[in-house]
């Protein structure tokens, strides 16, 4: 039996609250007294945590937990409260550091808290004066035929990535349905409370001094309210973690262990890899700790870095520090531009305990056989270098205490966007195996490249002033004839940023369209992404191909076939003319 919405017509008004996050002042500012018996109060989750009035919010909730006109939907931060009340381990640094001590000092009766958290709902699906509403914490991308089959974690954390625009996805995917979605949890793009035609986003960053968002629904319609929050922890607002230049490896590992956006992967031979989490990427949470945890491999017994790559660096306009208005004041000249090959990163380091080279990629070493990318690095290494060269590289990375950073090109095994004719290792840089990021001069890269007889990254241009650099940037960033991924830009102090070129961006987008066509997804909803005639032409051509052929072909193969088809069609048109 399909899950049916419940009628709430008996209430004179319905109030739906977004994430409160322990901001009691904002809550009571809206309520202006106690709740009314003839009105319904729905809380969309994340009652506590991050804010500094958690005690007061929980007291209010406990006082009203038996009220029939109060519904509390469970948010991801409410799961911390559930575990706290049941004496379970809470895996949240913020909760353990701030919220738990505040609740412990208030000496709550945990039995009452347990009774309260057991009343949590995962959704509220209701009708009100002929209008249907769906309230969840995380937000849904569509309205499934059977809501009860949606997992609890999806309802709490939302569907897809945190960066997904869940409001517009819901509207697109429920076209023709007269259903309004209300949710909290995520608002990465700082959308207004009425985020889309039939979707309301109640995440207002209240805990950072933003607003508590509330909907008031009456028979006359929907009112939106945003209540400023003057009481918040200013020291926690978008602060960056900092690491002292002379910090020891043990102390840095402690930083990594405590960091919300760093993950450790334990590998064979006592090696652990550290990398930033997907959440760091989707929420754009970067600091001096997790930018270093990018391809960092440590022998946890000898406490030595066995391999490391670059610190995380970003595309132009991806971060405040890489926007043009920032670069104009902060780039230090001369600025050098290098070409950017289109493969994947692999490193070759050295493990002293085993007296062996360490081959890594994507957080794994080649000893983990289920990870092909690291194994491919090792395979290609020994195909590229003979025994004498391999021995020389081993002594080089050992004695110089460095890692070799390669772009790994595998046209058959791992095709990307740009066409290559053969497998190859392209030497990018020689990075020291130490915490502070430092690499050898490009002259040493060129010397080693020549000695080993391999390719390396190439210097494209050197600029000595902003005007010449900016003119170059404007020219190449609009040039769709350059069939390369892009460039890496490095200034005199070692600051790095990336520029992706139009040709690469175009075919990367077409790769996404290709995947949707192969999966036979509804095509109409993706047409808005096709902004040029060439995009529409390729999309139309894809639809004419067999789905299996599209699915089993790389974007490089399909591009070649499309171009051949276009050339043939052009020749036919000229003949017929």
Image (cartoon, grey):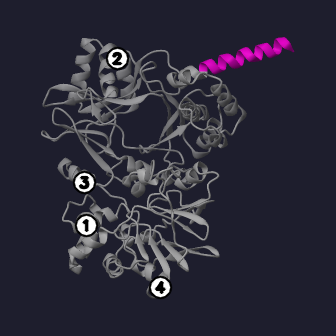
- Please check the rendered image and state whether residue 370 is part of the magenta-colored stretch, yes or no: no
Task: State how far apart marks 4 and 1 are (Cα).
Answer: 36 Å
Q: Is residue 150 visible?
A: no
Q: Which-is-in-front pick, marks 1 and 3? A: 1
Closest to the camera, between mark 3 and mark 4, is 4
Counting residues from the start of the chain, the first of labels 2 and 1 encountered is: 1
Q: What residue did someone put label 4 on? A: 36
Q: CA distance from mark 3 to mark 2?
A: 40 Å
- Work out which residue is located at the far bottom of the displayed protein and give it: 33
Residues under numbered marks 1 and 3 in contact, where contact means CB atoms less than 8 Å apart: no
Q: Nearer the viewer, residue 91 or 196?
A: 196
Asked if disc 3 and disc 4 are in contact, CB closer than 8 Å, the reply is: no
Residue span colored magenta: 560-577
- Tell me the quarter of the picture where residue 381 sits: top left
Q: Residue at x 62, y 38 (%)?
A: 477
Residue 451 circle label: 2
Label 2, label 1: how far apart the Cα atoms are: 54 Å
Pinpoint residue 306: horizontal percent, then vertical percent. Answer: 22, 34
Task: Name the residue beneath numbered marker 3.
Answer: 255
Please indicate whether residue 478 sits to the left or right of residue 253 in the image: right
Q: Which residue is mark 1?
A: 97
Mark before the other along the chain sequence, 3 or 4? 4
The extreme front residue here reads 1
Dot placed on the residue nearer the N-terminal end, 4 or 1 = 4
């Amino acid at each position: 039996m399909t899950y049916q919405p419940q009628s709430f017509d008996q209430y004179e008004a319905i109030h739906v609250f977004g994430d409160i996050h322990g901001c009691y002042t904002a809550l009571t500012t809206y309520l202006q007294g106690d709740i009314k018996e003839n009105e319904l109060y729905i809380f969309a989750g994340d009652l506590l945590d991050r804010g500094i009035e958690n005690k007061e919010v929980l007291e209010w909730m406990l006082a009203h937990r038996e009220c029939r006109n109060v519904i509390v939907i469970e948010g991801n931060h409410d799961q911390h409260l559930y575990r706290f009340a049941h004496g379970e381990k809470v895996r949240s640094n913020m909760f353990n550091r701030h919220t738990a001590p505040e609740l412990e000092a208030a000496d709550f009766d945990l039995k009452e808290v347990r009774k309260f958290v057991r009343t949590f709902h995962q959704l509220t699906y209701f009708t009100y004066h002929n209008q249907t509403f769906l309230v969840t914490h995380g937000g849904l991308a569509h309205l499934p035929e059977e809501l009860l089959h949606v997992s609890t974690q999806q309802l709490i954390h939302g569907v897809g990535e945190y960066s997904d625009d869940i409001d517009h996805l819901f509207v697109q995917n429920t076209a023709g349905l007269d259903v309004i979605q209300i949710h909290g949890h995520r608002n990465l793009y700082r959308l207004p409370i009425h985020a889309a035609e039939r979707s309301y986003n109640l995440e207002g960053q209240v805990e950072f001094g933003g607003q508590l968002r509330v909907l008031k629904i009456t028979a006359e319609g929907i009112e939106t309210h945003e209540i400023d929050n003057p009481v918040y922890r200013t020291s926690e607002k978008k602060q960056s973690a900092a690491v002292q230049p002379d910090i020891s490896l043990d102390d840095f590992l402690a930083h990594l262990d405590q960091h919300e956006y760093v993950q450790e992967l334990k590998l064979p031979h006592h090696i652990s890899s550290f990398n930033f989490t997907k959440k760091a990427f989707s929420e754009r949470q970067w600091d001096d700790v997790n930018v270093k945890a990018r391809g960092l491999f440590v022998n946890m017994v000898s406490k030595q870095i066995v391999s490391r790559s670059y610190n995380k660096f970003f595309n132009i306009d991806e971060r405040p520090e890489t926007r043009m208005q920032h670069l104009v004041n902060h780039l230090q000249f001369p600025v050098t531009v290098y070409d950017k090959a289109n493969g994947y990163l692999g490193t070759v380091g050295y493990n002293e305990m085993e007296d062996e080279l360490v081959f890594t990629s994507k957080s794994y070493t080649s000893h983990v056989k289920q990870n092909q990318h690291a194994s491919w690095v090792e395979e290609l290494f020994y195909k590229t270098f003979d025994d004498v060269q391999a021995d020389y590289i081993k002594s080089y990375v050992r004695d110089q205490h460095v890692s070799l950073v390669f772009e790994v090109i595998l046209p058959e095994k791992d095709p990307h966007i740009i066409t290559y004719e053969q497998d190859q290792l392209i030497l990018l840089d020689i990075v020291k195996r130490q915490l502070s990021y430092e690499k050898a001069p490009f002259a040493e890269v060129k010397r080693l490249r020549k000695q080993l007889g391999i390719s390396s990254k190439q210097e494209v241009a050197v600029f000595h002033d902003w005007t010449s650099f900016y003119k170059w940037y404007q020219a190449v960033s609009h040039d769709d004839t350059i069939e390369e991924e892009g460039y890496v830009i490095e200034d005199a102090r070692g600051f790095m940023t990336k520029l992706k070129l139009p040709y690469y961006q175009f075919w990367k987008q077409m790769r996404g369209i290709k995947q949707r066509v192969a999966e036979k997804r509804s095509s109409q909803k993706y047409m808005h992404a096709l902004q040029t005639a060439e995009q529409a032409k390729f999309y139309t051509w894809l639809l004419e191909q067999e789905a299996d052929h599209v699915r089993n072909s790389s974007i490089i193969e399909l591009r070649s076939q499309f171009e051949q088809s276009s050339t043939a069609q052009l020749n036919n048109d000229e003949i017929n003319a």
